[in-house]
């Protein structure tokens, strides 16, 4: 694909060079700074001064001034010219002779007294542009001889040349280029690399020099460009390795040069320009009768037989912009990155970022979003450039203005999509994705408000699920810009979150309540009422809670009371006074009941007034249900009341007892209250004689003695048995046989609790033993078991006592040997008196050592198992 990389500009016109002499042709050229030297076929050297002239439009042209021309005095054309500026000499090849010419006067330099200034029998030569010798006032060159298969290395001085090295080649060389110690040679049938210092060589590839002219061109440090078979331009380094892909040029190339990042090649009719970066043909210029192409210090000069031209490179930035205008993004990026070596670092970084950003917008316009995102990321794009494509997304407070010159040609997304709403939608989706990725990175430093506000507006417009996540997290959305946008798209719940984030909880609650009451429509949360309750649970603003709790309780007291019962008491959050809450809930009876249950049954608050209040509410509920004959509800209410009466020890018993004293329907509750007062006889009287509820009487005995010892439980069961055996009291009708059967069942079920002797004394003489068989059998077994267990324990104790007595006797009878030669186990000193203490195992120690050991012991424990025998 074509790109305009160079312009061909005339440098020396025909008339200036030859005047009226039609037969004069250009044979060679040399350029040194502004000085141009031209060798012609009539053995003349022409010296021109070139001046650059820039037009008002920025185009470059050249003005040539002829300074001198000089006849060399020979008959054949001037074959080659090379400048040695440090010596102010031209190295000239003419008629197979290399000699020196003064650069200013063009006079031939005479030979010095100590050596000649001419080399004969030369077919070609080259100057070493990377010499390794340290002398700045001499030039190294490689010379090809016409008669021998050798390459000669000469040192050129102001007035003489000196042979320093001669290297033999396997074939006659016909072209040469020199870099350091490395010679790149075109032999008759192949190219090769030769190190003239070590003699090492490396064959490259075959080439027939008889079919076409070889090209050997040094293009950089230890790197060469060669004309290979098949119309290829091959690159090779000093090791014989090609580190760049070849370029495909014409089969009839007669000259080549490198002007990075391009390879310029000349054939009979055209100049072709290939990129070294992607090997593609970039430009073709028509050029008839061309036969010379050389580059001098980055300046590419061409010559036909009659005139000289300069190939002027266009500025890289212009080339890159031309590629971008043509939407050739990859080529533009390759060219930009390839030009890094020729541009100062700071300037390149700035240029590279801008090109990446432009490339990103081009691919964004082509809906190639993945590639666009990568270029935006690498180019560190100010994301507001993207946001500005969507009108009204940036907040009114933003100070952003688009880059100048602009990075793209789009006014907005509608312009980009040409009215295609599907394209607009796809672009907005990409924008949402990209902003979501970069909002937490350094890319948005300094413009966080703009990015978050734009993202909020896009989320709201597109009904995006991430809107709530944005508002529930740390964000910088501008409130004044966001409110009308969220209202426009009916995102009232999200607006409430934004109010909350900005510390306006009251405004958030007012808005949510309007939605929950149906005044505003927003389907974001079906459980908005529950959310408001949870919000109040976590609020640290007590005034807010007292203000809005009434609304929540009126809407649903069972859920609204969670504001008080499920309140999180985290660090630093103020707590609600239960007394204040109870007062507040006075007009919400159901909520009050639930709150007291929370205090008493869940939090286990040990305060009499709360327990009494809850018991009174339970009782009132039961009393309310009694006349309604709703057995199911009544049963549940009584069960809750009875459970509280049984489990709590804090309520005012006499107060409650007074309330139900004359209530025949609540005898079971009265019995429980009497039990709390330990008036067990009254309780059992109610259960047995008034309710005739024998299972409840047994359960009462178990409950009343649950936290007491076995003797207390036995006493209660004996009391119940006595009530059964006493029969119905005067004035109470009842079957005494029923009470006797209840007594029998009681004994048979709980026989282990009773004292069998007392029971037998209490039972009537006329009772059948068969009725009491289970009780008696269990009692006899229990008595026998207790007797046998005690005998076993007594025997074990007696045995242990005997064993202890035996061990004591053994210790007392065992002799302890003490002598002056025997040492104490603790201090290791000998004994001086017979008074000792014996440690376990019969080890004697000093009495004072043991006393000291006991005093020093951290626990002051006494020695165990020690003998008192001394």
Image (tube, rainbow, N blue to C red):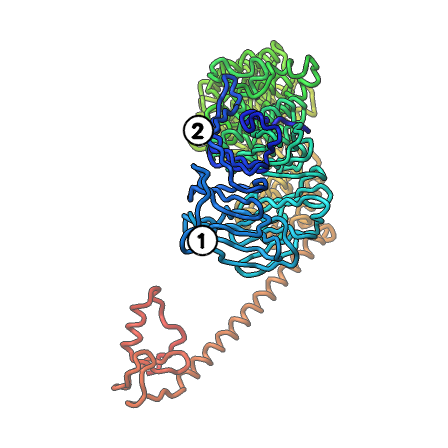
Q: Position of residue 143 (x, y in %)?
A: 55, 51
Residue position for label 2:
573
Numbered disc 2: secondary structure:
loop
> Can residue 594 be seen at all in this image of the molecule?
no
Q: Position of residue 535 (x, y in %)?
A: 53, 23
Q: Residue furthest top?
A: 519
- Count of numbered circles on the image: 2
Does residue 489 lie above or below 117 as drawn?
above
Q: Which mark is residue 735?
A: none
Residue 668 or 256: which is nearer the viewer?
A: 256
- Residue placed at 52% from the left, 54% from the top? 153
Residue 709 or 772: which is nearer the viewer?
A: 709
Name the side, left or right, on which 197 lies relative to 465: left
Q: Quadrant of the N terminus?
A: top right
Does residue 238 lie above or below 590 as drawn?
below
Q: Position of residue 9 (x, y in %)?
A: 57, 25
Residue position for label 1:
133
Name the side, left or right, on which 227 lies relative to 182: right
């Amino acid at each position: 694909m074509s790109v305009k990389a160079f312009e061909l500009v005339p440098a020396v016109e025909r008339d200036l060079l030859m005047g009226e002499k039609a037969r004069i042709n250009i044979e060679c050229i040399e350029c040194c700074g502004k000085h141009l030297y031209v060798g012609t076929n009539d053995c003349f050297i022409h010296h021109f001064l070139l001046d650059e002239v820039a037009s008002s439009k920025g185009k470059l042209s050249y003005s040539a001034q002829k300074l001198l021309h000089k006849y060399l005095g020979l008959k054949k054309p001037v074959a080659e010219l090379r400048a040695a500026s440090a010596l102010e000499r031209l190295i000239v090849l003419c008629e197979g002779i290399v000699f020196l010419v003064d650069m200013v006067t063009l006079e031939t330099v005479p030979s010095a007294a100590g050596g000649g200034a001419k080399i004969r029998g030369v077919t070609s030569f080259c100057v070493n542009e990377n010499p390794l010798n340290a002398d700045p006032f001499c030039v190294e060159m490689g010379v090809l001889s016409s008669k021998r298969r050798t390459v000669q290395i000469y040192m050129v001085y102001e007035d003489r040349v000196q042979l320093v090295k001669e290297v033999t080649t396997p074939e006659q060389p016909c072209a040469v280029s020199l870099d350091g110690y490395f010679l790149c040679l075109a032999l008759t049938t192949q190219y090769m690399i030769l190190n003239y210092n070590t003699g090492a060589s490396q064959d490259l590839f075959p080439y027939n020099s008889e079919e076409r002219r070889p090209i050997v061109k040094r293009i950089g440090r230890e790197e060469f460009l060669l004309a290979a078979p098949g119309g290829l331009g091959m690159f090779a380094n000093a090791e014989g390795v090609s580190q760049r892909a070849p370029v495909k040029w014409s089969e009839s190339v007669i000259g080549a040069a490198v002007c990075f990042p391009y390879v310029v090649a000349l054939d009979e009719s055209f100049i072709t320009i290939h990129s070294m970066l992607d090997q593609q043909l970039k430009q073709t210029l028509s050029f008839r009768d061309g036969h010379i192409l050389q580059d001098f210090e980055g300046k590419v000069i061409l010559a036909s037989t009659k005139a000289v031209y300069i190939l002027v490179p266009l500025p890289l930035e212009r080339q890159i912009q031309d590629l971008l205008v043509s939407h050739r993004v990859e080529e533009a990026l390759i060219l930009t990155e390839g030009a890094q070596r020729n541009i100062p670092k700071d300037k390149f970084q700035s240029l590279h970022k801008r090109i990446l950003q432009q490339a990103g917008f081009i691919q964004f316009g082509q809906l190639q979003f993945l590639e666009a995102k990568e270029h935006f990321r690498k180019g560190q794009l100010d994301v507001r450039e993207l946001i500005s494509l969507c009108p009204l997304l940036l907040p009114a407070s933003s100070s952003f203005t688009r880059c100048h010159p602009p990075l793209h040609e789009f006014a907005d997304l509608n312009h980009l999509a040409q009215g295609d709403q599907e394209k607009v939608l796809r672009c907005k989706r990409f924008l949402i994705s990209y902003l979501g990725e970069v909002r937490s990175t350094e890319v948005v430093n300094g413009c966080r408000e703009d990015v978050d506000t734009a993202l909020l507006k896009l989320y709201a417009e597109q009904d995006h699920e991430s809107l709530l996540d944005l508002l529930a997290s740390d964000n910088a959305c501008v409130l004044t810009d966001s409110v009308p946008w969220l209202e426009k798209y009916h995102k009232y719940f999200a607006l409430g979150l934004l109010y909350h984030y900005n510390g306006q909880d009251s405004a958030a609650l007012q808005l949510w309540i309007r939605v929950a009451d149906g005044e505003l429509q927003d389907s974001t949360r079906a459980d908005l009422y529950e959310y408001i309750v949870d919000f109040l649970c976590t609020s640290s603003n007590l005034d807010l809670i007292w203000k809005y709790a009434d609304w929540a309780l009126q809407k649903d007291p069972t859920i609204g009371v969670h504001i008080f019962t499920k309140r999180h008491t985290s660090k630093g959050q103020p707590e609600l006074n239960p007394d204040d809450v109870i007062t507040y809930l006075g007009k919400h009876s159901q909520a009050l009941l639930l709150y007291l249950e929370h205090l008493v049954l869940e939090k286990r608050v040990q305060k009499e007034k709360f327990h009494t209040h809850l018991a009174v509410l339970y009782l009132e509920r039961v009393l309310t249900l009694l006349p309604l004959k709703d057995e199911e509800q009544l049963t549940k209410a009584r069960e809750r009341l009875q459970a509280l009466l049984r489990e709590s020890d804090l309520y005012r018993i006499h107060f409650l007892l007074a309330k139900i004293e004359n209530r025949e329907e609540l005898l079971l509750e009265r019995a429980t209250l009497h039990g709390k007062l330990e008036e067990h006889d009254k309780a059992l009287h109610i259960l047995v004689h008034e309710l005739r509820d024998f299972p409840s009487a047994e359960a009462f005995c178990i409950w009343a003695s649950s936290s007491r010892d076995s003797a207390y439980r036995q006493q209660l069961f004996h009391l119940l048995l006595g009530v059964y055996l006493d029969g119905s009291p005067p004035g109470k009708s009842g079957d005494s046989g029923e009470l006797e059967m209840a007594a029998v069942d009681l004994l048979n079920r709980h026989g282990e609790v009773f004292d069998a002797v007392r029971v037998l004394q209490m039972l009537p003489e006329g009772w059948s033993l068969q009725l009491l068989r289970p009780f008696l059998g269990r009692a006899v077994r229990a008595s026998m078991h207790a007797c046998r267990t005690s005998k076993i324990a007594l025997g074990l104790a007696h045995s242990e006592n005997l064993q202890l007595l035996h061990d004591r006797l053994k210790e007392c009878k065992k002799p302890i040997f003490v002598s002056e030669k025997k040492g104490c186990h603790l201090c290791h000193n000998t004994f001086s008196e017979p008074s000792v203490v014996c440690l376990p195992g019969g080890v004697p120690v000093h009495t004072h050592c043991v006393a000291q050991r006991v005093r020093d012991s951290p626990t002051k424990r006494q020695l165990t198992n020690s003998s008192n025998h001394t």
